[in-house]
Amino acid sequence: MNTFKNLTKGLIKENPVLVLVLGTCPTLATSTSVINALGMGAAATIVLLCSNIVISALRKVIPDKVRIPCYIVLIAGFVTAVQMLVKAFAPDLDKSLGIYLPLIVVNCIILGRAEMFANKNKVFDSAIDGLGMGLGFTLALFLMATIREVFGNGTFAGLEIPVLAENHISILTMAPGGFLVFGLLIACMNKFAKHKPKKKSFGCEGCPQAEGCSKNGCGEVKKEAEENGN
């Protein structure tokens, strides 16, 4: 059950894009089409999985003072390998993703999971965490790309949709439309996942109505504070 929770937490409860709000730049840039979104998600998932495994295996060997540079070097190696594979077997996808494919090296999601999870947990748990977060990242990209491509371009994965092809909303494929869809998905995710911020509790001090308030003895608390010179 713990393994299942570790795998699925990245989909909804701790979705790296829609809840933790990480990796915003590649999310907005590569979510204009479903194919680009799935390609970016798959590449990031592979890097997340591999880097989490290696970093977890070497967590007791890597010196604490240089752990971040070591993480970047390891992640850069996996990103280079993935980029070479994409160039060899999917050159069109490589051209579409452009600079955002090598920029996976500095993706906050990958560095964040390496520092917060892989560095403190066993190899198997780190692998499951990386896979779950990668799937959550891919899911967020897919949802955004589906909305933006279908309604913004009138196509889905490059296939033309008869009615929407002639009545599409072009702004959804642009930056303002991307931010709009991104905000709406975050709002829906917060509602669905019941992700609510913690309410801060304040004391009676500094409240202008404390003297005349009888609730919880606010007036008495303020008088005592004045008598004690506080």
Image (spheres, rainbow, N blue to C red):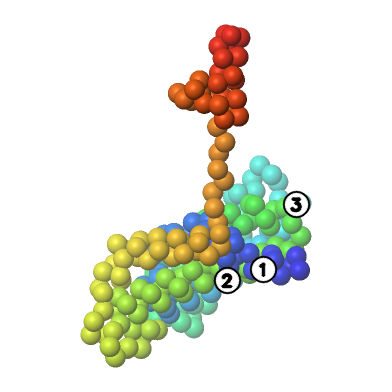
Q: Look at 29% across and 79% down and name the residue there.
A: 153
Q: Are there few (<14), some (14-19), or many (20+) residues within 10 Å of tag 2?
A: many
Q: Amino acid at mark 2?
A: Leu
On the image, numbered disc 2 is attached to which residue?
135
Nearer to us in this view, 140 or 86: 140
On the image, numbered disc 3 is attached to which residue?
61
Q: Quadrant of residue 112?
A: bottom right
Lower sequence index among marks 1 and 3: 1
Q: Amino acid at mark 3?
A: Val
Residue 151 lies, in percent from the top left, at: 32, 77
Name the front one of labels 1 and 3. 1
Residue 179 lies, in percent from the top left, at: 35, 61
**In the image, residue 145 above or below residue 114:** below
Residue 208 lies, in percent from the top left, at: 45, 23
On the image, numbered disc 1 is attached to which residue?
7
Q: Amino acid at mark 1?
A: Leu
